[in-house]
C-alpha cells in the first residue's frame, strides 16, 4: 500500500508539473503572437514586405521558435521564416481555418520530424476586416527536456522513500513475523511426519506467542489422541477378527441342510452299488461298481475337505490370488443349490490377469457371501453372470487419480433391491432375509477394504443386482493362473 501510494503521488505530481510547463510554453507563444498581431495590423500588407520579413526574422531569433508564417488572404501570399522551406501547406490551411472562423487555434503537430506547438490567429485591418493570419511554430523539445528533469527530480526522492520504507518493513517483518513463522513451519513439518514432541518457544507477549502456546497444546492433544486411536484400533481389529469368524460359522449354518443332501446322495449311491456287487459275481460288473464307489467316495472327501478348509481358522496369507480357482471352489460348494433352483451360471474371466496379492481364504469368503446373496435373490431361477477383468478406475467420491484394479462382477437377474435397502446393505446386522445375521456383506466389505479395495453395488427392483469388487493389482507381473471357470 505504501509503494502504491507513493508511486501514485509521484505519478500525479509529474502530471501536474507537465501541465504547468505546457501552460508556460503556451503563455510564451501567445505573448509573441500578441506582439506580432499588434505590429502587423498597423502596417499595410503586402506593400511593406521588408518590414514583415524583419519581424519574422526577429521572432525566429528565439531558439525555442522554429519559425513564423504570415499569410495575406486577398493576395494569397505567404511570408515565412528562412528555416521553413517546404511543407507549409498544412499550416497555411490551419491559418485559413482560423481566419474563416475568426478564432485562434492551438495544436500539437510536427514539422520534418520535429515535435512543435502551433499557435495560429487571424489578422484584421483598421476597419476590422480580415486580411490574413499568422502561424507560430514553437519547438516542444525544450519543454520535454524540462519535463524529463522534473521527472527525475520527483522520481529519485520517491524511489529513495519507497526503498527506505520497504527496507524498514522487510527487516521488521523478518524479525517479528518471518522468523516466528519459520519456527511454526518447521514444527508443523515435524508434526506432519508424526513427531508430536515438537515445541515452539517464543518468549514474547503478542498474538504470535499466543499462537505458539496454542500449537504446543495442540501437539500434546494430538499425541494423546494418537495413543488412544492406536489402542482403539487394536481393540477394533480383534473385534473384527471375531466378527469374521462368527460370519463364517453363520454361513456354514446356512449350508448345513444343503450339505446333508450333498453327502446323503453319494452315500445312497454307494449303498446301492454295494448291494449290486453282492448279487453279481462277474468280475467286470464288480470292477465297474467299485469304480462308481470310488468316484462317489472321492466326491464326499472333496466336499468335506473344502468345508474344513473354509471353517478352519488360520492366519492371514499374502500371496497371488487365482480368481478362477477361487470362484470355481465357491461354485462347487453351492452347486446343489444352483442346480436345484435351475440357475444358469455364465462366466467370463480374462486370462491372464494382473497379479493381486491377498489372502485366498478371506477373498473366497467374500465370493461365497456374494454368490449366496445372488442365489437367494433368484428363488425361481435365473442367470448369474460372473466376470473378472482388468480396469483403471478411481474410487467414487475421492479426488484421486485412477489406479489399476481387477474388477470381479456378480450380476444376477433376481428380484433386485430398493434404493433405501441399497443404502443400508453394508450396515452391520441389517438383513432383508428371514433368519439372516446381517453380517455377511459387512464382513465382506471389511475384507476388501483390508486389501485396499472397495465394493460397489447397483440394483433395481425387478431387474436384479450387480456387485462389483475392485482389488488393486500390480502391473509389473501377470497372474498366469487366471483360468476361466
Image (spheres, rainbow, N blue to C red):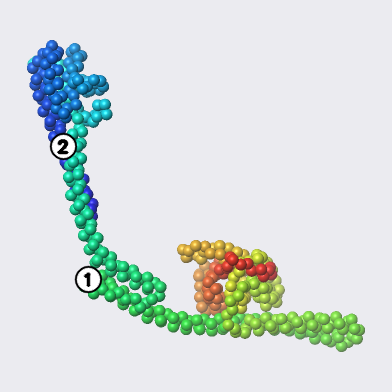
Residue at the image point whose x is 66% and y is 84% from the top: 308
Q: Nearer the viewer, mark 1 or mark 2?
A: 2
Residue at x 59%, y 66% (from the top left corner): 476
Q: Above or below — where is 274 with respect to 360?
A: below
Residue 337 visible to an observer of this rendering: no
Q: Quadrant of the N terminus?
A: bottom left
Asked where in the image residue 322 lies, by quadrant, the reply is bottom right
Q: Name which quarter of the figure residue 207 lies in.
A: bottom left
Q: Is residue 280 above or below residue 4?
A: below
Closer to the camera in the image, 189 or 361: 189
Residue at the bottom extreme? 278
- Within 10 Å of disc 2 (Cα), the crowding (few <14, some 14-19, many 20+) is some
| Mark 2 residue element | helix
C-alpha separation, residue under disc 1 versus residue under disc 2: 53 Å
Measuring 42% from the left and 80% from the top, which residue is drawn there? 229
Q: Position of residue 480 (x, y in %)?
A: 66, 68
Q: Which residue is mark 1?
A: 206
Q: Which of disc 2 and disc 1 is earlier in sequence? A: 2
Residue 229 appearing in the image: yes
Q: Position of residue 272 (x, y in %)?
A: 82, 84
Residue ID at (50%, 75%): 427
* Percent of width and height locating residue 22: 17, 35
Q: Which residue is mark 2?
A: 21
Horizontally, residue 449 falls left or right of residue 276, namely left
Amino acid at each position: 500500500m505504501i509503494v502504491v501510494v507513493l508511486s501514485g503521488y509521484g505519478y500525479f505530481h509529474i502530471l501536474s508539473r507537465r501541465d504547468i510547463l505546457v501552460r508556460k510554453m503556451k503563455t510564451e507563444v501567445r505573448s509573441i503572437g500578441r506582439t506580432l498581431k499588434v505590429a502587423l495590423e498597423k502596417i499595410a500588407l503586402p506593400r511593406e514586405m521588408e518590414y514583415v520579413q524583419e519581424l519574422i526574422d526577429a521572432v525566429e531569433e528565439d531558439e525555442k521558435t522554429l519559425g513564423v508564417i504570415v499569410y495575406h488572404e486577398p493576395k494569397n501570399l505567404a511570408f515565412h521564416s528562412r528555416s521553413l522551406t517546404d511543407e507549409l501547406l498544412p499550416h497555411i490551411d490551419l491559418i485559413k481555418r482560423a481566419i474563416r472562423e475568426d478564432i485562434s487555434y492551438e495544436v500539437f503537430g510536427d514539422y520534418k520530424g520535429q515535435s512543435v506547438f502551433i499557435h495560429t490567429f487571424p489578422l484584421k485591418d483598421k476597419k476590422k476586416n480580415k486580411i490574413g493570419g499568422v502561424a507560430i511554430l514553437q519547438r516542444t523539445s525544450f519543454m520535454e527536456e524540462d519535463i524529463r528533469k522534473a521527472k527525475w527530480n520527483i522520481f529519485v526522492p520517491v524511489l529513495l522513500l519507497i526503498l527506505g520504507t520497504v527496507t524498514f518493513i522487510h527487516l521488521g517483518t523478518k524479525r517479528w513475523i518471518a522468523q516466528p513463522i519459520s519456527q511454526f513451519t518447521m514444527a508443523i513439518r515435524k508434526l506432519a511426519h508424526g513427531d508430536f514432541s515438537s515445541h515452539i518457544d517464543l518468549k514474547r507477549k503478542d498474538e504470535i506467542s499466543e499462537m505458539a502456546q496454542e500449537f504446543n497444546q495442540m501437539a500434546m492433544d494430538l499425541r494423546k489422541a494418537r495413543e488412544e486411536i492406536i489402542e482403539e484400533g487394536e481393540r477394533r481389529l480383534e473385534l473384527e477378527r471375531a466378527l469374521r469368524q462368527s460370519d463364517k460359522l453363520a454361513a456354514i449354518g446356512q449350508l448345513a441342510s444343503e450339505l446333508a443332501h450333498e453327502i446323503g446322495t453319494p452315500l445312497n449311491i454307494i449303498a446301492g452299488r454295494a448291494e449290486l456287487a453282492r448279487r453279481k459275481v462277474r468280475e467286470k460288473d464288480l470292477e465297474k461298481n467299485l469304480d462308481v464307489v470310488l468316484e462317489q467316495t472321492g466326491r464326499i472327501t472333496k466336499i468335506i475337505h473344502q468345508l474344513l478348509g473354509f471353517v478352519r481358522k488360520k492366519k492371514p496369507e499374502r500371496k497371488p490370488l487365482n480368481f478362477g480357482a477361487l470362484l470355481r471352489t465357491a461354485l462347487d460348494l453351492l452347486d446343489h443349490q444352483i442346480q436345484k433352483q435351475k440357475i444358469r451360471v455364465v462366466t467370463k474371466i480374462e486370462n491372464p490377469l494382473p497379479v493381486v496379492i491377498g489372502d485366498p481364504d478371506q477373498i473366497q469368503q467374500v465370493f461365497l457371501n456374494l454368490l449366496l446373496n445372488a442365489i437367494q435373490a433368484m428363488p425361481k431361477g435365473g442367470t448369474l453372470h460372473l466376470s473378472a477383468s482388468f480396469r483403471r478406475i478411481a474410487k467414487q467420491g475421492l479426488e484421486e487419480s485412477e489406479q489399476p484394479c481387477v474388477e470381479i462382477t456378480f450380476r444376477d437377474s433376481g428380484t433386485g433391491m430398493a434404493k433405501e435397502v441399497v443404502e443400508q446393505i453394508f450396515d452391520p446386522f441389517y438383513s432383508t432375509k428371514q433368519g439372516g445375521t446381517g453380517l455377511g456383506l459387512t464382513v465382506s466389505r471389511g475384507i476388501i477394504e483390508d486389501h485396499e479395495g472397495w465394493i460397489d453395488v447397483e440394483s433395481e427392483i425387478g431387474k436384479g443386482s450387480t456387485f462389483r469388487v475392485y482389488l488393486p493389482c500390480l502391473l509389473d507381473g501377470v497372474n498366469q493362473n487366471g483360468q476361466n471357470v
